[in-house]
Amino acid sequence: MNKKDVSTRNRIIVILLMLLCSAALIVVAMLLRGKGEKAGSLENGAADPDSDRTDGTYSDAGGTYGFAMGSTISVRLYGEDAEACQREAIDAVKELDRKVISWREEGSELAEWNRTAKAGTDVKLSRTLGDALDRSLELSDTSDGALDITLRPVLEVWGIEEATPDDFRVPSEQELKAAGAKTGTADLRLTGSRMAQDGEGSKKNEEAEYALARSREDIILDLGSVGKGYALDVVYDNLQGRSLSGGVIAVGGSIMVYGSRGDGREFRVGIRDPEGLPEDILGYITFASGTGKQCISTSGGYEKYIEKDGVRYHHIIDPKTLRPAESDLISVTVICGNGLLSDGLSTACFILGEERAVKLLRKYEAEGVFVRRDGSVISTPGIEKQVVLQ
């Protein structure tokens, strides 16, 4: 395949991904409604693209929409500042991706660290990137390595994200071993922490200054497993102090709801059927009007996969086997008050399987909805009364 063919194929893949993300967000729009209502304002009104924007961002009566991190973004806020804040939220996600956490985007802080950091040399980080890495590395430790932000070389060997059935092949053991040798959070040293120690234990350190070093220059960082959830945290922080009563924000498969619409209606977030079409749902999770910040992230082998010779290979790689994860679960939805954690925990729990996942969620006071391989759905005690199955 020549370079022109590869370029054309990659453009087609991006277009298909955008269409799939858009279909997924239609499900969100249909389910974020109050009792007895049609999809609320999220599905009402014709699109009214903003002629002043050339980056694909547009608004309609249901909210504001954009594209970043390889996913569609949807923002619906309520209150006096809603319209302006919706556009600011889209811009914040794009800026976070472009300038800070993208491993692909040339010029982003993380991409530059991957490209230029010398072995053993501390590189000062922004608070935004430092905080994301701090939380991610902590979760990596707590999950016994199930979440691994150094797994990019293995993902590249598999190539599931961009391959087609015609050119995909299962990597050899030698290839996987060589790629696996280039991974490992033990080769990272992050100094500075959001948690400072004092005589009474740990407390949040608002003045933390971060620096990151790697012991080997072939260690590459990729925050794809937590980035969409982290974007929710960044947007939420940016919205504080504005005249808003609440809202719904979706970045790919990570969704945040908070506050109220102002009319007392509850929020509903759909649970996708992992064996159905993007618009098929098993049920939904309800959140009462006036709820605090709630972040909901889902991981499953149906999100990105490729089939070859009758076998399905999905994109969630187990760091211990270096192969697509296999457990008793086919989908995991995690609910908690932090976007990065909801995103990272959903990935880790999918890899760990039900028994270990439940234990991990308890450590973070998070809740989960699990779809087992036999199709049954179970919820942790703290969320089960809010889960409505169809």
Image (cartoon, rainbow, N blue to C red):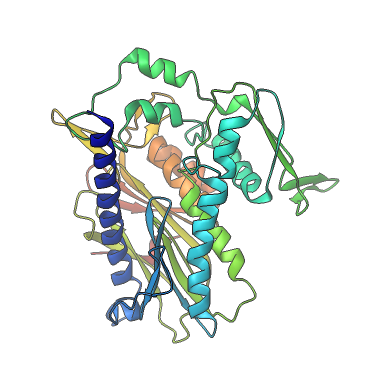
Residue 60: x, y in percent?
35, 78
Residue 218 sits in quarter? top right
Asked if residue 258 can be seen in this view, the reply is no
Give whichever of 306, 111 is nearer the camera. 111
In this rendering, is residue 340 above or below 323?
A: below
Image quadrant in which the N terminus is located: top left
Residue 55: x, y in percent?
41, 62
Residue 154 sits in quarter? top left
Residue 291: x, y in percent?
51, 72
Residue 113: x, y in percent?
60, 35
Give whichever of 359, 171 is nearer the camera. 171
Asked if residue 351 can be seen in this view, the reply is yes
In this rendering, is residue 326 above or below 283?
A: above
Give whichever of 58, 78 is nearer the camera. 58
> For this view, does 108 lie left or right of residue 224?
right
- The residue lying at 53 percent from left, 47 percent from top is 362
How many numbered marks, from 0 up?
Answer: 0
Image quadrant in which the C terminus is located: bottom left
Q: Residue lying furthest left in this view? A: 310
- The residue lying at 69 percent from left, 23 percent from top is 120
Q: Residue lying furthest right in this view? A: 199
Give whichever of 46, 208 is nearer the camera. 46
> For this view, does 137 lie left or right of residue 173?
right
> For this view, does 25 lie left or right of residue 106?
left
> For this view, does 140 lie left or right of residue 131?
left
In this rendering, is residue 50 above or below 282?
A: below
